Amino acid sequence: MTTDRLLRWCASSYGRLLSMLRVGELHERQAMRHDGESLLRAAQPRGSVAMIATWFGLLWDLFFVGVVHDLRQALRTLLRSPGVTIRISLLMGLGVAATATLFAFVDAALFRPLPYDHPDRLVTVFESSVSQERLREGASPGNILDWVQRSDSFDALTAMMTVSATLRAGDGGAPIRGVHVTKGFFDVFARKPSMGRTFDPAEYEGAASITSRQASSSEPVIVLSHRLWQTLGADPRMVGRSVSIEGRQWQVIGVMPPDFAVPDASAAFWAPWDLRASYRGARFPNGPPRDARFLRVVARLKPGLSIEGAEARLQAVAGGIAAEHPATNAGWGVRLSPLAEEIARTSRLELLLVFAAMFCLLLLLCANVASLAVARGVSRAREIAIRLALGAGGARVTRQLLAENLCTAIVTMVIALALTAWWIGAALSIAPDNIPRLHEVALTGRVAAFAAALALLVTAVGNAVPTLRASRTPIAAALKDGAGVSTSNSGRLRSGLVVAEIAAAVMLLVGAGLLARTFAELQRVDVGFDTRNLLVMRITPDAARYRTGAQTTDYYQRVLTALREIPSIESVAAVTSLPMSAIGSEFTRPFWPEHAPLAGNDAPHASIRMATPGYFHTLGRLVVRGREFDDRDIAGAPAVVVVNEKLARDTWGGEDPIGRKLILDYQRGPYPYEVVGVVRDDRHDGPRSQPIPEIFIPHAQNPYLVLNVIARTTLDPLSVAQTARSHAMRVDPDQPVHSLTTMEQLLGESVQLDRFAMLLISLFAVGGLITAAGGVYALLAYTVTERRREIALRMALGASPGRVKRAIVMESLRLATAGVAIGLVAAIAGSRFARTMLFGVAPQDPTTLVGAVAVLLLVVATASWLPARRAALIEPVRAMRI
Amino acid sequence: MTDKPRSVDHLLPLKPKVLQMLLALADGPRHGYSIMQEVAERTEGQVRLWPAALYGLLRELEKADFIAESHARPAAAQDDERRRYYALTQFGKRVLDAEVRRLESIIAHARTTRALRKASRA
């Protein structure tokens, strides 16, 4: 029964294919069908597998008989006009390569699984408080230790903290980033080192933070990143040797593989860390703190456990902890999210948007190629008609064109792959380094397969219409001299394609316009201080050498004094966390005004920064009320703070905060500080960020080891940089002064992803505009040639050249209007998704929309001008005689 | 045309599939499927002709005047109107004849050499 139905289906599909392809003449087709059916029937007793095999045999036979002949013929045809072939392939190859290059980035950042065992079981754990609207905070040491003890959802759970450190190599020092990791780190990520081993459980016990001033007795151990190992000379016998970091000798026990980048590619080494050992003693009488939420926690789920399930279980644990420690944990729960998602989070939208824009451009290219192919099909109608008239079957002609397409596709593929390989290298060198998993971007098999498939697809789509239509070319009409072939149909089709191109170009233009305005707004926004002529550098002294606060304060005072000696430096100061700079100690602590009902757990948080005297003056940040720090504010003097306007407004409303006290729960525990000054708000994390509450503490009253030094210069800051560095180094040649840059550069870096997106989409928009203009031009040029006689007739009957010109331009504008309408609707619908990328401009910004339309209409009118002129120059007598 | 015998030498050797098809038609007219079956049977499945390939070759042979469509059809009961019957032309017979003779001479020559004797002994 089933084989009967299969037989009928196989036979009828074969028959239908035969008549669709118009193989041979009718009799022959029928005979072939008969023979095919006989074969199928002969196979029937042997079962459905034999029948399917026979059916495939028939299809193979149908399509690939004489394929070598077809290919040879196709090559000959293509080589007859190599210019056109290369041009089309190059156009498509460029588009495919650009898309594939972007795909390499998107694939690495968003799609490819993380390079760890069972990456789907890796989750990031956040602490989360709905009532305080702090949903994705890091975790606190105390809570983490409890989670590890009480939770049964994870195979392993680890906490990480990234720190800046100094690598001592030869006579100089280099700043590097190291990661403290707690027990279980290498069980969570489950990667084997490429050399040596990872930490034993015993090696975590008692391991202090690398920047801590606690001296450790034995030589501590570290694992190096592949990159740091290469920097150190790629010694194959590195394991067992020592390196000097932060003024201490560390024994290297292992080297990780190149793609191990935890938490990101900047990590140069991993050191074991014991939370319990780091948070005890006089400073932490209650043991590891629970209200300092700053650690990054990653865990490996037990097999078979869902994220939701694990979250629910850990939530129960967190509930228990909150009940035991209401002062710090009331209202705090946990939130789990997949690690891969967390890594991609920062730039998912930008990447997808850029990719979407690229796809838009690719479609545009496709439409253009299709339009070219239709035109070419029309001009080849005669040739095809002759073939058909001489007895070639429809199938032969179709197959012939298929073979030509295949050749084009192969050429396109080769061009695309070569360009992709080249462009990925080029793009890597200019890509902003905050794109996640940048180090994994490469021309992988997936990317190559994507490029190849896309090349095939683009060729297929571009050539579909003429290929499928060829066998139905009306022979008589095509052979008639001078007549157009199926004009109305292909004309309408090409008009449709041009409308689509214009619509796509409008979308790209609107996107580029919005991003350009965003970027301009970002440049214009007042960040709250003077960014010009500001030199920035970073000093990371050895913790081992500057053990006490007094030593640190003294060191920085001498550095600042040495810098002031330089004539072109007006003033200098130092701070823990600079605006616009991602590096630096960024953390928040709870505070409340004295005598306030709010206290403890419900208290608002403010960012804490330590600054030296003259910081606000040097930065050019206005002190609105009171004073800034000066030489009075030394260790032992009354504890004072400067707050920003946002904090003052939120805490005291309109009242004058000067002289009032606020309680800050920081190093001294809850302790009153007197407010001596209020400074203007700034946009600390870049132009897009909003002002946050800030509290500044005099550096001398809370000495911090690592500071950013800023200097206001009278000349170009970079010209002073080397002098400044050598002056600072003179104080203590062993302490590296590094990361010299200017505030304007930092500002530029903070918007580099915006700049990248804007440049890329502008590039696409220009490409789209050119392609659309080319499409309009080609269509009109073709129409004019085709309608030569008609135009000549009109002119002979009295139409003026101006009128003819106008008619042609109007026709193009008619197409443009349709395309613009479609494009605008799509752009308005689409731009809402990109809302978070915009700044200071609405998604439906009328100026941008009108501007995009105006640019497009202008370009279309220009593109139609040449064909219109050619039409007006037609000489009626000559045109009608031909 | 048949008065003045055309030379056939330049058409030789024939492609293996063409030779098989001409051989299949040597006994009398056949339709496509029957040619296919006959060839498969005689070569023990080594030469298989699928419809599109078969009709491509039939068309070539027709064009070359080796075969012609035959209008002698079997009794209606055994016939299918979709079938097309082909028969060798006079010219086709001569070509086949020449090819077979050419092969014969090759085989005769081969028999006199050691190579074939060895092979036949083995």
Image (cartoon, grey):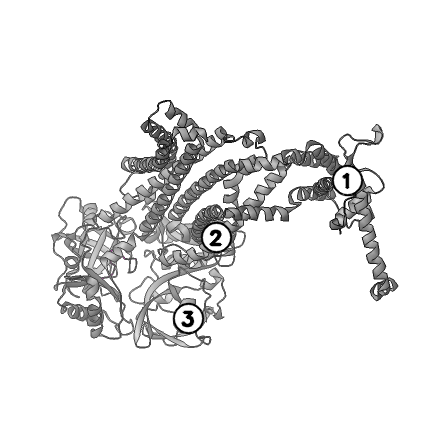
The tag earlier along the polypeptide, 2 or 3, is: 3
| Distance Cα–Cα, label 1 vs label 2 | 48 Å
* A578 falls in the magenta region: yes
Going by the numbered disc 3, the residue's amino acid type is: Trp
Query: Residue beneath label 2, please?
Result: A415
Q: Amino acid at mark 1?
A: Ile
Tell whether label 3 touches label 1 (CB within 8 Å): no
| Marks 1,2: beta carbons within 8 A | no
- Provide the chain ID for the residue under circle 3: A
Label 1 – label 3 distance at C-alpha? 79 Å
Mark 2 and mark 3: Cα distance apart in space: 37 Å
- Between A349 and A262, the residue placed more toward the observer is A349
Residue at disc 2, secondary structure:
helix
In the drawing, does residue A840 fall left or right of residue A784? left
Q: Secondary structure at mark 3?
A: helix
Residue A45: image x %, image y %? 79, 40
Q: Is residue A670 visible?
A: no
Q: Which mark is residue B67?
A: 1
Tell me where residue A869 appears, x and y as whole percent: 34, 34
Looking at the image, residue A9 sits to the left or right of residue A299; the answer is right
Label 1 is found on which chain of the structure? B
Same chain for the residues under marks 1 and 2 in the image? no
Dominant secondary structure, magenta: loop
Q: B48 left or right of A401?
A: right
Please identify the quarter of the rendering in which residue A736 is found: bottom left
Disc 2 sits on a residue from what chain?
A: A
Between A170 and A120, the one lying in front of the other is A170
What residue span does the magenta drawing correspond to?
A575-582
Disc 1 residue crowd, few under 14, some 14–19, many 20+, Cα 10 Å: many
